[in-house]
Image: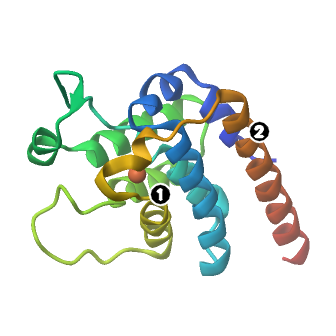
């Protein structure tokens, strides 16, 4: 059994507080895409789904007059940096293995290059899986951040992912 599950992460007050800013529906979709892509790329789905769920946890609210202000956001955003730090702190607090917490934090840090100077990032397979999962759920004008989901549905989908990952780990341990 894993020490930390998606269910535990999702239920934590820090996740509940910050994940709503960028949308829980988007976070759950990205965790599911991350699972699929991780299996295709032979990456640990445990790390990929946790990074997928938490990848946007660093968002600030860039509201002006009740509307998200994209130019403010573009100029000032550091959500990947903030998110990597916030996710790492949360994961360590709830008992995640420090190596896993670091790998997840790095995947969050590098899931977008929108805040970085021009250039090419050389992503590890895990980091590429998380970036692709985020892209897979993106919609024009940031609409993916506004999609709605009720908390019970989000939790049920994350518990289903937890079960798949536990099964994968059991299979991997059995064949080792
Ligand atoms: Fe995202």
Left or right relative to 85: residue 95: right
In the picture of the structure, the residue carrying the numbered disc 2 is 156
Q: Which is more toward the observer, 73 or 2?
A: 73
Residue drawn where x is 17% and y is 41% of the image:
73
Residue drawn where x is 77% and y is 38% of the image:
156
> Picture quarter containing residue 151?
top right
Q: In this view, does 150 lie above or below 51?
A: above
- The answer to the question of whether label 2 and label 1 lie on touching residues, with beta carbons closer than 8 A, is no
Specify whether residue 4 is in view: no
- Mark 2, residues whose alpha carbon is within 10 Å: few (<14), some, or many (≥20)? few
Q: Which is more toward the observer, 17 or 50?
A: 17
SS for tag 1?
Answer: helix
Residue 84 in the image: state x and y as whole percent: 36, 45
Which quadrant holds the C terminus? bottom right
* Furthest-right residue in this view: 174
Residue drawn where x is 44% and y is 72% of the image:
128
> Picture quarter containing residue 35?
bottom right
Of pointers 2 and 1, the one earlier in the residue sequence: 1
Residue drawn where x is 82% and y is 51% of the image:
163
Left or right relative to 133: residue 79: left
Q: Distance between the residues labelled 2 and 1?
A: 26 Å
User: Please, which colouring scheme is shown?
Assistant: rainbow
Q: Does the residue labelled 2 lie within 8 Å of ligand 1?
A: no
In the picture of the structure, the residue carrying the numbered disc 1 is 103
Residue 39's tag is: none
Q: Which is more toward the observer, 137 or 161?
A: 137
Residue 5 in the image: state x and y as whole percent: 70, 41
Residue 79 in the image: state x and y as whole percent: 28, 43
SS for tag 2?
Answer: helix
């Amino acid at each position: 059994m894993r020490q930390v599950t998606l269910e535990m992460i999702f239920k934590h007050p820090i996740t509940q507080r910050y994940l709503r800013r960028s949308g829980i529906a988007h976070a759950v979709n990205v965790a599911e895409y991350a699972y699929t892509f991780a299996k295709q790329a032979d990456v640990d789905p445990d790390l990929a789904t946790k990074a997928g769920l938490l990848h946007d946890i660093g968002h600030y609210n860039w509201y002006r007059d009740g509307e998200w202000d994209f130019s403010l956001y573009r100029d000032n955003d550091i959500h990947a940096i903030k998110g990597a730090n916030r996710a790492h702190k949360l994961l360590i607090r709830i008992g995640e293995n420090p190596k896993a917490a670091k790998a997840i934090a790095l995947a969050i840090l590098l899931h977008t290059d929108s805040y970085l100077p021009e250039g090419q990032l050389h992503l590890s397979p895990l980091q590429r899986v998380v970036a692709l999962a985020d892209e897979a759920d993106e919609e024009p004008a940031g609409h993916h951040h506004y999609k709605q989901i009720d908390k019970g549905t989000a939790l049920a989908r994350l518990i289903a992912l937890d079960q798949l990952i536990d099964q994968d780990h059991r299979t991997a341990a059995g064949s080792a």
